[in-house]
């Protein structure tokens, strides 16, 4: 099996890497979770849905990376992670993000308001 670091997608249509990652164990993928999240910056990218499916097999190890994204200045990335990833997380994991979701829903920056991050965070909190 190849080194999972070598299987981090190189471009938005890198299905060869995705197919190889699907053959890896959770233990092999775990170290590259942060790098995989970079492929969730735009859900229109062809590999984005496949990367999400790979990441959905993980639990608590996702939380630090999601927190980092939700605390970043990249409102577009926050949008895609909230809409296409966080909305599908189990409540047990969402509870770990309550602080960030509350902050985004009550105190969004201007770019977050433009992306409607505050509204999406409220929806997630209320579901």
Image: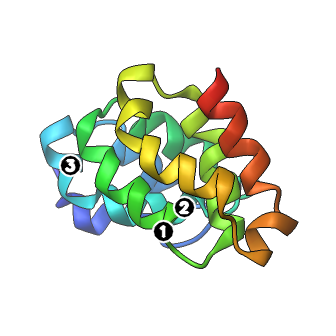
Mark 1 to mark 2: distance in Å? 18 Å
Which numbered disc, 1 or 2, marks the residue that appears first in the sequence?
A: 2
Give above or below for 47 relative to 22.
below
Q: Quadrant of residue 36?
A: bottom left
Q: What residue is pinned by disc 1?
A: 71
**Element under disc 2:** helix
Q: Residues within 10 Å of mark 1 (few under 14, many from 20)?
A: some
Rendering coords of residue 110 (x, y %): 79, 76
For image coordinates 71% across by 53% down, the residue present is 43
| Residue sitting at the far right | 114
Instruction: Provide the secondary structure element on which disc 1 rests.
Output: loop
Q: Nearer the viewer, residue 72 or 14?
A: 72
- Left-right relation of 123 to 102: right
**Which of the marked residues, 3 or 2, is nearer the chain's N terminus?**
3
Reading the image, the residue beneath label 2 is 39
Residue at 27% of width from left, 60% of height from top?
32
Front: mark 1 or 2: 1
Which residue: 66% across, 54% down?
106
Confirm or deny contact between disc 1 and disc 3 (CB under 8 A): no
Q: Is residue 104 left or right of residue 34?
A: right
Q: Give the percent coordinates (x, y) of residue 16.
A: 48, 54
Q: Residue at x 23, y 58 (%)?
A: 4
Residue denoted by label 3: 30
Q: Secondary structure at mark 3?
A: helix
CA distance separating discs 3 and 2? 15 Å
């Amino acid at each position: 099996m190849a080194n999972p670091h070598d299987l981090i997608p190189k471009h938005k249509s890198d299905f060869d890497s995705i197919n190889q990652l699907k053959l890896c164990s959770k233990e092999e993928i775990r170290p590259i979770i942060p790098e995989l999240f970079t492929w969730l910056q735009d859900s229109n990218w062809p590999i984005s849905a496949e990367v999400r499916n790979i990441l959905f097999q993980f639990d608590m190890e996702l939380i630090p990376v999601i927190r980092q994204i939700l605390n970043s200045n990249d409102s577009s990335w926050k949008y895609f992670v909230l809409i296409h990833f966080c909305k599908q997380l189990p409540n047990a994991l969402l509870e770990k993000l309550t602080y960030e979701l509350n902050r985004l829903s009550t105190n969004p920056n201007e770019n977050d308001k433009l992306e409607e991050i505050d509204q999406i965070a409220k929806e997630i909190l209320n579901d």
